[in-house]
Image: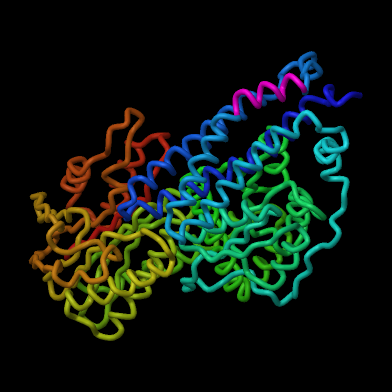
Amino acid sequence: MTTDSCPPLSLLAHLRHELRTPINAIIGYSEMLLEELETEDTIVLSAELQVIRESGVKLLGLVNTLLNSPQSEEDQFNVNLSVLSQTLTLELETPAQTVINCSGQLLKQADSEFLPDLTKIYTAAENFLKILEELPNFSEQQLLINQTYHLSLLEQKPQSKPTANSNLKLVTSLTSNSEGKILVVDDNPTNRDLLSRQIKAQGYQVGTAINGQQVLQMIQTGEYDLILLDIIMPEMDGYQVLKSLRESQWRHIPVIMISALDQIDSVVKCIEMGAEDYLTKPFNSVLLKARVGACLEKKRLRDQEAFYLKQLAQANQEITNLNKRLQAENVRLSAEIEITRRLQQMILPKEQELSQLDDLDIAGFMEPAEEVGGDYYDVLHDNERVKIAIGDVTGHGLESGVLSIMVQTAVRTLMENNETDPTKFLETLNRTIYKNVQRMNSDKNLTFCLIDYQAGQLNLSGQHEEIIIVRAGGEIERIDTIDLGFPIGLEETIADFIVSTQIKLNAEDVVILYTDGVTEAENKLGVQYGLERLCNVVKQNWYQSANTIKQLVIEDLRLYIGEQKVYDDITLVVLKQK
C-alpha cells in the first residue's frame, strides 16, 4: 500500500484531529484575550485579536469541510494524498498566515501580560502550517496509531485499577458549600492550559493530569466532582480510563469527553461506556459552561440522594440491603426519592392531632405531581394557640421536597420557642431558608402564608394564593395576600414587607387554603380549573364538615382533570369554625 492510498477514513480522521489541535489554541486563546480586553481601552489590540479569532473559525470550517469523511465504501479508497495536500495548502495557508502576521505584530506592541498567550497563538499557527508542509510525507506507520486505536479500545486491559479505602465517604453533607472541583485530563499542554483557564474563570477548582495512569492515581487522593477527559493519550487512553472508572468505586464521578475526534462511532462508544457528554475541539466556551454546570448539578443531586439513603438506612436494614443490590443508577435514584416521599408524608399533621382542636374542624390533602413534592402545609397547636401554615416551593421534585421539609422543621422550632410576633417569625424563617438555599447553590424559594388562630380570630401574614372565606350561608370573601409578605428564601431579609391582617370567624364559617396546583390544573382542552370553580364547589357545600368539603373539592378536581397528566403538586386545607 502506498502513502497516497492510506485508508481514507483513518487518514481523514487523523488529519482532522491533528489540525484541530492548533486551531483549538488559536480560537481559545484569542477568545480569552478578547474577554480580558473588554474592560480596557485597547481598540487596536482587540481588532487584531478579532481578526485572529475569525481566521481560526474560518480554518475550523475549512478543515471540517475539506476533510469530511467519504460516505460510500467506493469513495473511501479514492482519496489521493498528494492532491489532498495541495488542496489543503491552497485553502488553509492564507488564513493561517493571517494568524501568524497578526499575532506577530501584536507581540511587538502588546503589554507584557498578554505576551504568553499571544506567543501560544503564534506557535499554534506555525505548527498548523508545519502539519500542512509535512502532509505529503505522511507514512502508514504515522497513521498506525489511528488505525489500531479503535480496534483495541475494549480489548486492552487497563494497567491498573483505582482502589479505594472502604471507609471513603462518597457523599458530603447537605450543608456543604464548597465549589465544584474538576479534573482536566489531556496530554497536550496547550489544551490543558486552555481548558483549565476556562474552568477556573467559571469559579471552579481545577486539577490537571497528563495521562490515564495519573488520573487513576489522583482520584484516590482527591475528591473530584467532574472529569474532563481527552481520548488520544499515551500509556493509557481515554477509553481505558472511562472503562476503568465505570468498574471502580469512582463510577459516580461524571465524565465529559473532550476530543478533536469527531467520528460518530467515537461519540457513541463514549456514551455507551458511561460518559455523560462529548464535546469536540475546538470547544465552545458557552456550551462548555452549560455542560459542566449541568453535570455538576446532576452529581450534586446524586450526592444529596445518597446522603439521605445512608442516614435512613441505619434505621431500615431492608432499604440498606436493597441499596446494595442496586446495579443501575436509575434504580438507586428511584429508591432515594421514595424514601424522601415517605419522610415528607410522615411529618404531615395526623387526623388524631386535628381532632383534638376544640374550636376548629380541619381537614388537609396533599398530593405531589412526582414522587416528591414542593408543597407544604402544617397545623400546630399549643394550649389555645393554633398555627396553620401553607407554602409552595418553586418547581417540584427532590430538591423542592427537601426544602419543604426544612420549612416544616423551622416552623415547628419557632413555635416551640414561643415566637408569637408574625414579623419576627417570618423574618427568622426566611433567614434560615435563605441561608440553606445558598448552601445548596439553588434558586428555589416559596410562597408562604402563616395563620394564627385563637378564639375565632384569624391573624394572616405572608404572601401566598388568595384565601377563600365562606361565611355561613354561602357568602364568599377572597383575601389577597400579595401585600402581606414576600417569597421565602428569595432575599436575605423580608421584614419590611411583612404585614398582618385580621379576620373574625363566626360559627360555621369556612376557610379554604390551597396551592396553585389546584387552580392551575388543566383539563384535556388545556383550560385551568380556576378559582371561580373552586369557590362554587365550596359555596354549594359550606354546611358540610371540613373533611366532606375537602373530599368534594378533590373529587370535582379529579373529574375536571380526567386522564390528563398532573404537572404540579396539589394541596388543599379546609378550616371550619365550630
* Front residue of 6 and 136: 136
User: Picture coordinates of residue 88 (x, y %)?
Assistant: 66, 25
Q: How many marks?
A: 0
- The image quarter containing residue 425 is bottom left
Q: Main secondary structure of the magenta part?
A: helix
* Front residue of 329 and 18: 18
User: Picture coordinates of residue 319 (x, y %)?
Assistant: 65, 65
Residue displayed at 41% across by 67% down: 405
Compared to 507, does 466 lie above or below? Answer: above
Q: Give the residues in magenta.
A: 82-92
Residue furthest to the front: 108
Magenta-span inclusion, residue 88: yes
* Residue 350 seen in the figure: no
User: Picture coordinates of residue 200 (x, y %)?
Assistant: 50, 61
Residue displayed at 65% across by 47% down: 257
User: Picture coordinates of residue 285 (x, y %)?
Assistant: 49, 47
Residue furthest to the right: 1
* Residue 81 seen in the figure: yes
